[in-house]
Image (tube, rainbow, N blue to C red):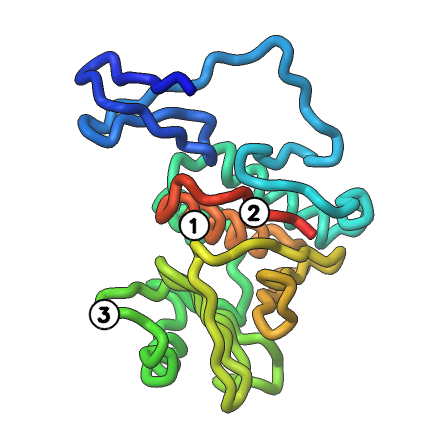
Amino acid sequence: MEILKCEQCGGELKRIRTRHEWFCSFCNSRYSDEPSETRKPCAKYYGLNEEVFSVECDLSKVMKKENGSGCIKSIVHCMDICENSSEIEKYLSAKCKIPDDISMKGLREDQIANALPRINEVMEPGERVIVYGNKGIFSKGKEYFVITDKRSIFVEKKNISQVLHTDIDSLKIADCGNCNLNGDYSKGIVNLDGTGTFQGALLALICVLSFEADMERAKIRLV
């Protein structure tokens, strides 16, 4: 297999699959893929990055519903316009309509502070909370999900579970916009804005964080 070299320093280039780009790990120079005239978009992907995702389900059923369609389109949009996870974070706070049950930096941070004593048991020192989401009207502080820069955490009353972003094998997105990580109902991120837009941006963030942590990882399956 041909090893591509950096034009600046001669270092080996690695692929950034979330951006269709290459980068040099020595001098951080970046190179864009040349557009291919023979490359034809696959209809079943609906614009999703085929270097990142492997679609193993019929997304047409999801796309027929407003929330499901909004979720998929938001994933595509965020990964098209944002260079990295930091830009998606900024997009979440500056461009999205943030649901009332979501807490972020500068917004309802007291809910994050209340959750920290519980979720610290599965977090590493220095790990940063990005988003907290309450999962129901009658479950304040009892059922919620937390997205950090390393993992997704799920609390249901006395039970707590988590999955590292690098360990996410699949996403199961329902037509209502809800998404289960690795097909596990207990690891569900619910659609809270009624359109799927915020949900999609959050899933885009998780996926990009996963590839930033392990650029050689396998594609994320949509099942």
Dot 2 surroundings within 10 Å: few (below 14), some, or many (20 or more)?
Answer: many
Q: Quadrant of residue 9?
A: top left
Looking at the picture, which amino acid does disc 2 mark?
Ile
Q: Position of residue 104 (x, y in %)?
A: 39, 64
Q: Earlier in the sequence, mark 1 or mark 3?
A: 3
Q: Mark 3 points at which residue?
A: 125
Q: Which residue lies furthest to the top in this view?
A: 37
Q: Which residue lies furthest to the bottom in this view?
A: 158
Q: Could you say which is closer to the camera, residue 137 or residue 53? A: 53
Q: Where is residue 120 in the image (x, y as percent from the top left)?
A: 32, 78
Dot 3 surroundings within 10 Å: few (below 14), some, or many (20 or more)?
Answer: few
Q: Could you say which is closer to the camera, residue 222 or residue 142? A: 222
Q: Quadrant of residue 103?
A: bottom left
Quadrant (top left/top right/bottom left/bottom right) for the N terminus: top left
Q: Can the viewer see residue 94 in this picture?
A: no
Residue at the location (67% across, 48% down)? 70
> Is 148 placed above or below 89 here?
below
Residue at the location (36% across, 60% down)? 150
- Of the numbered discs in the image, which one, if any, rests on residue 210? 1
- Of the numbered discs in the image, which one, if any, rests on residue 43? none
Looking at the picture, which amino acid does disc 1 mark?
Ser
Dot 1 surroundings within 10 Å: few (below 14), some, or many (20 or more)?
Answer: many
> Is 48 placed above or below 203 here?
above
Q: Name the residue under label 2.
A: 220
Looking at the picture, which amino acid does disc 3 mark?
Pro
